[in-house]
Structures are given as structure tokens and as C-alpha cells.
Image (cartoon, rainbow, N blue to C red):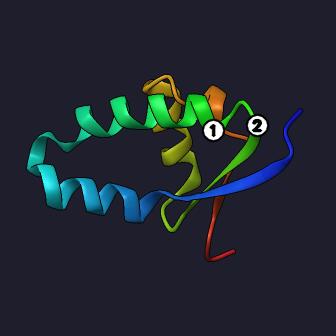
Amino acid sequence: MKTSKNYIFFDEIVAEYFNQYGKKYSVKLVRDLKRHLADLAKTSEIVVITRQDTFKVTNWFIKNDLYQFTHSITNATI
């Protein structure tokens, strides 16, 4: 049973990984998110918050096989 909501601020995570790992950040980000979100999704609903177009972010999650861990993806400006 999912008992709580956890909010992931996607833009900040991407920026942090880019600053730390440079142009190859995407591979490390997907690997870490997959591991982290899989564990977190067992007990929580994961809400991804972004300032980007939610369609693009949703497609990125689908493409990288991460969407199944999310409850919703929402834009912070709405």
C-alpha cells in the first residue's frame, strides 16, 4: 500500500547531474533514477515536477523505462 507522496523536482536533478558529470550525465541519471525510483515506488506515489513541457518529460520517462514508477508528471507553473 502506497502511504505517501514523494515529489521529485526533475529540472534540479538534471541540472545537478549535468554539472557533476558533464555531457555524459544522461546515462548515469537514468541508471540512478531507475534504482532509486524502483525502491521509492514500492511505498510512495511519485510526483515529478518540472518547468518544462510535461509531454517532453513524459516521453523522456517512457523512453528510458522510468514512467512505470511515476504517479504523475506535472508542470510547476500551472
Identify the residue shown where x is 62% and y is 77%: 77
Identify the residue shown where x is 46% and y is 29%: 34
Identify the residue shown where x is 72% and y is 30%: 42
The image quarter in which residue 14 lies: bottom left
Q: Are marks 1 and 2 in contact (CB under 8 Å)?
A: yes
Residue at mark 1 to residue at mark 2: CA–CA distance: 6 Å
Amino acid type, callout 1: Leu
Task: Give the quarter of the figure containing the C terminus.
Answer: bottom right
Identify the residue shown where x is 58% and y is 53%: 54
Lateral position of residue 25 relative to residue 60, left or right: left
Lateral position of residue 44 relative to residue 11, left or right: right
Categorize mark 2 by other alpha carbons within 10 Å: few (<14), some (14-19), many (20+).
Answer: some
Is disc 2 placed on a helix, strand or loop? loop
The residue most toward the bottom is 77
Categorize mark 1 by other alpha carbons within 10 Å: few (<14), some (14-19), many (20+).
Answer: some
The answer to which of 78 and 68 lies nearer the viewer is: 68
The answer to which of 24 and 38 lies nearer the viewer is: 38
Above or below residue 48? Residue 78 is below
Q: Which mark is residue 40?
A: 1
Lateral position of residue 37 relative to residue 17, left or right: right
Whole-percent x, y for residue 69 in the image: 64, 32
Lateral position of residue 12 relative to residue 4, left or right: left
The image quarter in which residue 32 lies: top left
Amino acid type, callout 2: Thr
Q: Which mark is residue 43?
A: 2
Task: Give the quarter of the figure containing the N terminus.
Answer: top right
Q: Which mark is residue 56?
A: none
